[in-house]
Image (cartoon, helix red, strand yellow):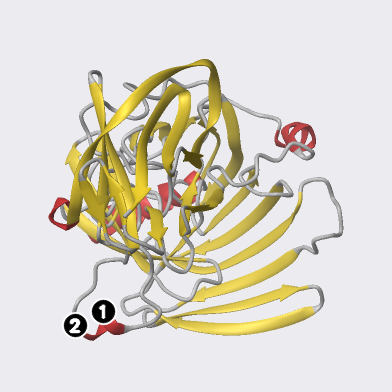
Amino acid sequence: MRTRTAAPALIACVLVAAPGIVPAQAADSGAFVTTLGQDTIAVERYTRRREELRDDLLLRERSPVTVLHVVATLRPDDSVARLELDARAASGAADPPGMHGVATYTTEQTFFEITRGGETRHASVLTPGGAMPFQNFCYALYEQIGRRARALGGAHVRVTVIGFGASLPFTLAVGFPSADSMTVGFGDEAPTLMAVDAAGRIRRGDGRLTTQKVIVTRPPSLDFAALSAAFAGRPLGLLSPGDSVRATIAGAAIAVDYSRPAMRGRKIFGGLVPWNEVWRTGANAATRFTTSADLVMGATTIPKGGYTLWTLPTPTGWKLIINTQTKAPCEGAACTLPTRPPLWGTGYSADSDLVRLDLTVGELPQPVERFTISVEPQGGGGVLAMQWETTRVSIPFMRK
């Protein structure tokens, strides 16, 4: 699952709509339900008029469960001139305090005014050519981004977007492969596929090709207030929370930093995680492995230092891939900056492989809901193990 803010690790989406500018309607309304496996992670309702979009969005992928109320002022070219955002806990609790914000979008900059707990801050971000607002899981805004892309014209359009209060914009790649489809992706990442009607309204979304894996449906109606009350005390929290493993094996300090996706009622290996494809071995940022001393895995020496871990699952066996790339791709002077972000889990490059090693595969007696990595002592060395669903894979190692 991927969700990025300042350094967008963002989800990619495919919306489906007819090419060509769709005339603004006098009024339109709808609702969306977003699910991840068996879990509902967001519900939404909206009303769009010629010059205004109003949206209410409940988000469970955080704690506390949060309700966002959005009012966007629309221009005739389907861009957004101004957006007001109110965020509050769905339970009505005063802690944490609610937030009120205003964003103004010009052809060169985006201006933010954000008030929380009685304090107001202002910020501006350069967005040459203008930007559209972005909010994860807000499909009314995705519809608006689709309308804007159609207004710009062309079979492939890049639309600059920016999250509310973010310090950097990013680009959504929007394409129209057929009369009833539109693809929207974060950079070159795989898109979510969505079906829409002739007016550009999303009818259904399938994000299983993306790192988010969500399904979006458009119910004929929903009781937003009732659902907000029902979900208020039931946060899911981070969908793939970060975790770490620390162990000392024969005097070598071993560290693993990774994210932990959950089954959520889905088939994992051979389903969510395809066979015969390199897997990110977790979620979000690439799984990081660090050792303070040289190790031996199989017959291979792993020099001390930092690596990323990947796996290649197949029906007949698994490979562990130890890769030397740990930072995001860069060019020129940017490669020397201390702010260079870590490698994201979609950034695998086989050119940086140190080694591929066979893993021992075993079956667990009970399913493991969340992906788990462990480093355990074994004899005079240790074993690196991974468990999810009913599969356990492992490899022993020794200090050299």
Crowding at mark 2 (Cα within 10 Å: few <14, some 14-19, many 20+):
few
| Residue bearing mark 2 | 332
Q: Judge from the rendering whether residue 343 lies leftward or rightward of residue 134; answer left or right.
A: left
Q: In this view, does 314 lie above or below 303?
A: above
Label for residue 335? 1
Please give the name of the residue rendered at 52% of the width and 48% of the height, measured from the top-left corner: 138
Q: Which type of secondary structure does the marked residue at label 1 adopt?
A: helix
Q: Judge from the rendering whether residue 304 lies leftward or rightward of residue 135; answer left or right.
A: left
Please give the name of the residue rendered at 53% of the width and 19% of the height, measured from the top-left corner: 367
Position of residue 354 measured from the top left corner of the image (x, y, whole percent) = 19, 54
Q: Do the residues labelled 1 and 2 touch (CB within 8 Å)?
A: yes
Q: What residue type is labelled 1?
A: Cys
Crowding at mark 1 (Cα within 10 Å: few <14, some 14-19, many 20+):
some
Q: In which quarter of the image is residue 233?
A: top right
Q: Which of 218 and 63 is in front in this view?
A: 63
Position of residue 355 measured from the top left corner of the image (x, y, whole percent) = 19, 48
Q: In which quarter of the image is residue 358?
A: top left
Q: Nearer the viewer, residue 354 or 242?
A: 354
Q: What residue type is labelled 2?
A: Gly
Q: Judge from the rendering whether residue 68 lies leftward or rightward of residue 250; answer left or right.
A: right
Say if residue 248 shows up in the picture: yes
